[in-house]
Image (cartoon, rainbow, N blue to C red):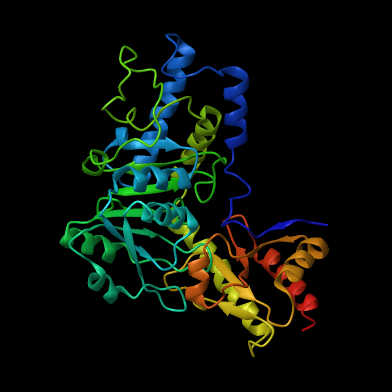
Amino acid sequence: MNRIYLDQASTSFPKAPGVAQAMMDYLTMNGVNVNRGCYSSAYSAEEVIYETRQLLAELFHFSKCKNVIFTPNVTTSLNFILKGFLKPGDHILVSAMEHNAVMRPVVQLASSGISFDRIPCRTDGSMILEKVEELIRPETKAIVTLHASNVCGTRMPLDALGEICQRHQLYFVVDSAQTAGIVPINMDKMHIDALAFTGHKGLRGPQGTGGFLVSQELAEQMEPLISGGTGSVSHTEEIPDFMPDRFESGTPNLPGIYGLHEALLYLKTHSLQAINEKELSLTGYFLEQLQALDDTGRHIRIIGKKDLTDRNAVVSIQTPEIDMSQVAWQLDNEYGVMTRVGLHCAPNAHKTLGTYPAGTIRFSFGPENTKNELDFAIQGLKKILDL
């Protein structure tokens, strides 16, 4: 039985060509550490790290290469940012569609005197932009939002939010987990102060890679979440005050960074617009097939936007007449179609969409998926639901 991977919002597969080879080459032909060895192999590894920072700064239109910080994932990055600069008495705004990578740190911080309000969103996941400025208080420090929902794919209006932050002198923090490597992001034009990213989704690199890009102004307001050896200024026990060492301690994931480096080189030769258009073409096709399969909405309920306006290649559905876990299991077991079922680590997003507590079955597409694969998934749904 062929396997059809439609869980790209969780992690990309296949990875970019050359990623696995780059990681294996590092482990078998280099394998040394950085900032700790005075020999050519260590210097060559440092060059790869530096080039990876450059590629990320270029991708996101960010001017400070040294302010590209590596972490294990986007969740760690968001914890670094939020716990690094927020203080008791501060207030922030978050969207009503946030993933727990934002909400759990924010709720945790609420116990230490930091408050938040949710910017309301419609039942298709789109933000009610006119409500934003009504929620800003004198003590508001930042707007924090994901770029696109991992549940239904709806995108947030980053340009407009960045302008609001500029007018009110707020920091703008963006979670790009679902869009980096798929949708163009211009940190300078969008007035983004901190952008958290992960390497293993749209960037098509390995798991265990991620980081954040942070403006110098915000970096100076942040306390390091983790401290330790950096291989620099080793004569002192104080945390370095310069970037990137201020926020990077311990041994980096060098095999992962080598893989991410290769993925970014591959991505540099491909148009983000073309990738986005390919994914949205698949999304539109899948939505049409779903609606043709059940135009009454009795057997299949499509969640979120039913067109391609301001959205990512994510389609969530509910099957009111059959348990969704059963449907997802049959899709995998009988048809080889891999999806995700449940709440997708975003409970308030489901409350906004009207799908809490049941959750959804999520189909998500990447540039390597095909219409034939989507047809097979539709046929599987048709047989499982007896349509």
Residue under the point 28% across and 40% down:
222
Split into 4 quadrants, where in the image is the C terminus?
bottom right
The answer to whether any part of residue 163 appears in the image is: yes
When the figure is inspected, residue 345 is found, relative to residue 203, above or below; the finding is below
Q: Which of 57 and 96 is in front in this view?
A: 96
The answer to whether any part of residue 18 appears in the image is: no
Split into 4 quadrants, where in the image is the N terminus?
bottom right
Judged from this view, the residue extending furthest toward the top is 38
- Give how far across and how far down residue 277 sits, in percent: 48, 63
Q: Which of 370 and 113 is in front in this view?
A: 113
Judged from this view, the residue extending furthest toward the bottom is 296
Indicate left or right for 280 with 379 as reference. Answer: left
Indicate left or right for 266 with 322 as reference. Answer: left
**Circle count:** 0
Indicate left or right for 304 with 114 as reference. Answer: right
Q: Nearer the viewer, residue 258 or 325?
A: 325
User: Which quadrant of the structure image shows residue 135?
Assistant: bottom left
User: Which quadrant of the structure image shows residue 256?
Assistant: top right
Residue under the point 48% across and 24% down:
251
- Give how far across and how far down residue 51 sits, in percent: 40, 30
- Give how far across and how far down residue 69 sits, in percent: 38, 36
When the figure is inspected, residue 62 is found, relative to residue 169, above or below; the finding is above
- Give how far across and how far down residue 345 sits, in percent: 55, 59
